[in-house]
Image (cartoon, coloured by chain):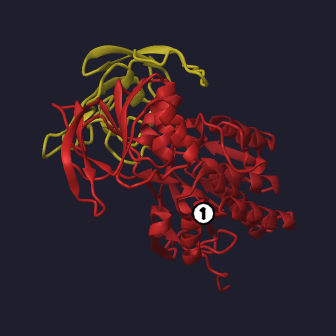
Chain colours: A yellow, B red
Amino acid sequence: MELIQKHPILEFRHGNEVTFTFDGQEMKGFEGEPIAMALHANDVRIYRVTPEMKRPRGFFCAIGKCSSCFMVVDGVPNVRTCVTPLEPGMKVETQHGKGLVPLEAK
Amino acid sequence: MKKMIDTDLLVIGGGAAGLCAAAEAAGAGARVTVIESDLHAGGQLVKQTHKFFGSKDEYAGTRGFKIADILLDEINSLGDKVEIRTNTTVTGYYPEEGFFTAMKGEEEYYRIKAKKTVVATGAQERLIPFPNNDLPGVYGAGAVQTLMNVYGVVPGKKVLMVGAGNIGLIVSYQLRQAGVEIAAVVEAMPKVGGYWVHAAKIRRLGIPILLRHTIVEAFGDKVIEGAVIQELDDKFSLIGEPRTIECDVICMAVGLTPTTELFWQADARMLYCPQLCGHVPYRDETMRTSHPDIWVAGDASGIEEASAAMVEGRIAGHSAAKALGLPVREESFKEYWTRLDHLRAGEVGEKIRGGICQVLVDGWEA
């Protein structure tokens, strides 16, 4: 993970390291930290692809206000990954298009 | 889970203003519920590594993230008067029924009925138009701070900063603290918008501040690989040769706009005020809006800075507690206004003062 190793002022206290998947690929992140941050630390930049223009989108505001980082998490689309805490074993997927209400979630 | 919760005072937003409002009202004896959409309280304070200015009353000389801890300690010292609900977003206000709806996480909804409410929803980032401004790697300055200062994640290898206001300057410095290279800071205006000390700090690090320059376009295959910048003349028309800058992050520090949806839903009287950076509610001296049970504090009342937000929070919390019929220390109100006037004094406060005089009313008719 691309983490800041040394900082002149801040000390980072991360939670437990857990495993999750992104589009089927296994990754490591910290439990309770936002999904979007864990992805970024794993060098993932594209979180969804827009419905009409098929443009790649990453995150933008990181405070749950802008909708840029919507992804499919455990089958549920349009999850604000910048403010949704990572849980062990989460299945995170790139969202293509608008996202459909799942008929079955976890 | 209970689907309807009752509280004396609902504070929407657990940042600088909201925490101060909660602490003040709870100090007077109110039962307070704070709703915070992020995973932790503290708002933008938790992302600030620099020492604050102002006076001792606003924690001058203390780093932002430590001020958040001080406020949370104050709240904890009040026992169980204040409940802070994180990872929860207020999604709407229903004026006829008089309740708010809230959503925990993405799916758990419930209602909140409050006697009084302080809306301290803060602000959101602005973006300026240029080709490919939607590519991953164009990040708001707050997002960059969240990545590196809250979660310790390296935002990128090389950053182009757009905007030399206080946020652009401070975040540039913070990026260097995190070990990230900065290609340049571009600023369309002919002078630096932020405080001179912040600009001096980053100039000493050898980071170029390119005044009268703007970003013309971003480029990259799927993600940001660089940007094209160009000089501007007095009329903000492009002049000179475009220059290509390689970078993987373009950090947008081009201003904020107040988050005001709930005021609109509550039918509060609003005004578009450029000095306060968007639509804001009219308010009286106690920060009460035209809705008799709703107060405003912090950036939601107009973009200013954290010190003023904290004092406004105190004023709103004080006034809401008084409206709840609780005994408050009357002198505090005058003291808070003295502090606000002090923060807004001089040349740096000119714009804010010009904005506030447009939306400050003498009082609301009973």
Residue that label 1 marks: B347
Q: As displayed, is residue A62 above or below residue B193?
A: above
Quarter-of-image position of residue B283: bottom right
Residue B360, x across and y down, in percent: 61, 76
Residue B361, x across and y down, in percent: 62, 80
Quarter of the picture containing the C terminus of chain A is top left
The chain holding disc 1 is: B
For image coordinates 63% across by 35% down, the residue present is B65
Quarter-of-image position of residue B49: top right
For image coordinates 65% across by 68% down, the residue present is B287
For image coordinates 77% across by 42% down, the residue present is B74
The residue most toward the bottom is B365
Q: As displayed, is residue B101 above or below residue A35?
A: below
Q: As displayed, is residue A33 above or below residue B353?
A: above
Give the structural element (helix, strand or loop) at label 1. helix
Quarter of the picture containing the N terminus of chain A is top left
Q: Nearer the viewer, residue B248 or B295?
A: B248
Residue B220, x across and y down, in percent: 18, 33
Residue B88, x across and y down, in percent: 52, 44
- Residue B290, visible in the rendered structure: no
Q: As displayed, is residue A27 above or below residue A69?
A: above
Drawn side of residue B135 relative to residue B287, left or right: left
Q: Amino acid at mark 1?
A: Glu
Drawn side of residue B99 relative to residue B221, left or right: right
- Residue B207, visible in the rendered structure: yes
